[in-house]
Image: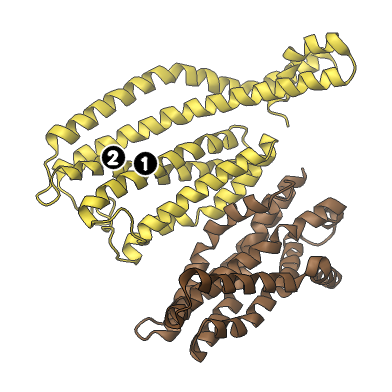
């Protein structure tokens, strides 16, 4: 293989992740600022605009963290599912990066919603935990997230790991509609859907508006963290490829010359494996 | 296809005690429960279906990691991948053989073990029926995990972590159907039909996903 061939090949192959990274660098700062502003607005509305509940008092404010976190927990799984479809069907080089980056974030949001839910449940329902359909399916979601993260970490080769995780993600997707409709199918302790219903939201604007602003802020936070995690993952894979390339050239016996040349040519297989 | 089925059956019966191993494990789980919850026969009668289902679930997981791994090690998995028949069908045949070798003995042992747990005759019939319908689903879903972890040297633990959350719906409806057969207001039919539906669904999803995972692992 001649040098020119190598060069054009590497440019063509790296074009996508590289362009992606440069776009990321441009939008990252505005995105972070926007997130901070949205959180400031959301928290202000939560504490000074939304009224206390006549029964629950100030504890109702937990809702403004709990509900967006739960939405985002499911949203992250949707992102993973779309990423998995991208991996398996279109073989897009960034799809499995996106899916992998969304996993820990989704697990974190699921955990936040479970913890805030139980902090809220203790004074309201008198118990930290009930085996109610919504709570149980959220717990299952958390376990699925953790299992997916474990699968990502156990398989060395990122492409293989991506495919395996994508298949499991698609199989586990069955849990998402179960979570969404669990409160309608099994009417247990958790209250039924009240924001996204066919008849429109069933709650008063003084609570709905802060809730939606908080949901928006959470979505921005997720987006910012997701992009950051994707960038880290791309860089991590580049380092891995460079290391392997360096090891390979040392092993092939060319010694110091090959090792010194390993870095520029090492970028080539970053997306080819 | 038939040859593969018979080969699989022979292998799974002969390896390491084969079918008896699963049943023995099932027996041990059922024996351990009364020690944990106390020998109160009424309590055991109420917990019985749940105990039997958990025992069957764990016993099914026991042999699953060998489903594709042995073939991967000796290279016969490559032959299956290169063969003329669709891989999905191969996976289905392997699952069928695996179920006959490990799942069916569990179902057959259930009536006997139910006696230890003080179940009524109706309850025994219900648990056996739900296990008959449900264990194939457990094997088929387990095949997905077995295929995902096929390239890992010690995939057994990860397999259980990946698979158990997916088997929870089967467990829920299996147990609620068996409990519904004994207690009066709760119905038997509805959860039983849902369990049948879940099994049929895993009949479709299991082989497709497992075959996709095997292809992904071989590249």
Q: Provide the secondary structure element on which disc 2 rests.
A: helix
Q: In this view, does A19 lie to the left or right of B154?
A: left
Q: In this view, does A91 lie to the left or right of B100?
A: left
Residue A166 % position (x, y): 60, 45
Q: Is residue A28 left or right of residue A54?
A: right
Count of all numbered marks drawn on residues in the image:
2
Marks 1,2: beta carbons within 8 A:
yes
The chain shown in yellow is which? Answer: A
Q: In this view, does A23 lie to the left or right of A219?
A: right
Q: Between residues B70 and A198, which one lies in front from this camera angle?
A: B70
Q: Provide the secondary structure element on which disc 1 rests.
A: helix
Please tell me how crowded label 1 is: few (under 14), some (14-19), or many (20+) other residues with Cα within 10 Å.
some
Residue A219 % position (x, y): 36, 35
Q: Between residues A103 and B26, which one lies in front from this camera angle?
A: B26
Could you give the CA–CA distance between mark 1 and mark 2, rounded to whole angstroms? Answer: 8 Å
Please tell me how crowded label 2 is: few (under 14), some (14-19), or many (20+) other residues with Cα within 10 Å.
some
The label on residue A65 is 2
Q: Which of marks 1 and 2 is nearer the N terminus?
A: 2
The residue that appears at 57% across and 28% down in the rendered structure is A233
**In the picture shown, does residue B150 fall above or below A94?**
below
The chain shown in brown is which? Answer: B
Location of the N terminus of chain B (image quadrant):
bottom right
**In the picture shown, does residue B127 fall above or below A200?**
below
Residue A177 % position (x, y): 43, 57
Residue B124, by quadrant, is bottom right
**In the picture shown, does residue A246 fall above or below B65?**
above
Q: Between residues A188 and A6, which one lies in front from this camera angle?
A: A188
Q: Chain for mark 1?
A: A
Q: Chain for mark 2?
A: A
In the picture of the structure, the residue carrying the numbered disc 1 is: A112
The residue that appears at 66% across and 21% down in the rendered structure is A239
- Residue A159 can be seen, yes or no: yes
């Amino acid at each position: 293989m001649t040098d020119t061939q190598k060069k054009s090949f590497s440019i063509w192959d790296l074009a996508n992740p590289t362009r992606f990274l440069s776009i990321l660098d441009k939008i990252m700062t505005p995105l972070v600022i926007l997130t901070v502003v949205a959180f400031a607005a959301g928290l202000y509305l939560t504490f000074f605009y939304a009224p206390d509940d006549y029964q629950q008092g100030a504890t109702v404010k937990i809702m403004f963290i709990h509900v967006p976190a739960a939405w985002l927990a499911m949203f992250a799984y949707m992102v993973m599912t779309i990423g998995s479809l991208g991996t398996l069907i279109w073989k897009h080089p960034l799809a499995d990066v996106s899916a992998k980056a969304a996993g820990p974030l989704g697990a974190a949001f699921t955990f936040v919603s479970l913890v805030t839910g139980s902090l809220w449940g203790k004074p309201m329902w008198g118990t930290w935990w009930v085996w109610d359909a919504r709570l149980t399916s959220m717990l299952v979601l958390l376990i699925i997230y953790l299992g997916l993260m474990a699968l990502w970490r156990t398989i060395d080769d990122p492409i293989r790991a991506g495919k395996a995780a994508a298949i499991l993600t698609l199989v586990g997707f069955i849990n998402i509609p179960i979570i969404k409709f669990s409160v309608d199918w099994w009417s247990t302790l958790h209250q039924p859907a009240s924001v996204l219903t066919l008849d429109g939201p069933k709650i008063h604007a003084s609570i709905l508006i802060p809730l939606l602003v908080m949901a928006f802020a959470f979505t921005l936070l997720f987006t910012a963290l997701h992009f950051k995690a994707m960038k880290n993952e791309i860089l991590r894979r580049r380092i891995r490829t460079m290391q392997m390339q360096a090891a390979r050239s040392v092993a092939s016996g060319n010694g110091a010359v090959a090792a010194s040349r390993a870095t520029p040519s090492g970028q080539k297989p970053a997306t080819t494996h | 296809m038939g040859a593969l089925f018979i080969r699989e059956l022979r292998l799974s019966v002969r390896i390491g005690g084969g079918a008896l191993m699963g049943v023995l494990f099932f027996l041990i789980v059922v024996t351990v429960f009364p020690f944990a919850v106390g020998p109160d026969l009424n309590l055991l009668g109420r917990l019985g279906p749940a105990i039997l289902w958990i025992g069957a679930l764990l016993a099914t997981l026991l042999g699953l990691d060998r489903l594709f791994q042995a073939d991967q090690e000796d290279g016969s998995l490559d032959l299956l991948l290169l063969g003329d028949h669709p891989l999905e069908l191969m996976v289905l045949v392997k699952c069928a053989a695996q179920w006959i070798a490990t799942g069916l003995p569990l179902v057959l042992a259930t009536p006997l073990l139910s006696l230890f747990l003080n179940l009524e005759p109706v309850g025994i019939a219900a648990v056996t029926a739900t296990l008959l319908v449900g264990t194939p689903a457990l094997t088929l879903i387990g095949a997905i995990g077995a295929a995902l972890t096929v390239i890992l040297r010690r995939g057994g633990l990860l397999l259980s972590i990946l698979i158990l959350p997916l088997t929870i719906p089967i467990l829920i409806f299996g147990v609620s159907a068996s409990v519904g057969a004994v207690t009066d207001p709760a119905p038997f039919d509805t959860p039983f039909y849902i369990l049948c539906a879940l099994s049929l669904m895993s009949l479709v999803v299991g082989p497709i996903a497992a075959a996709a995972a095997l292809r992904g692992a071989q590249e």
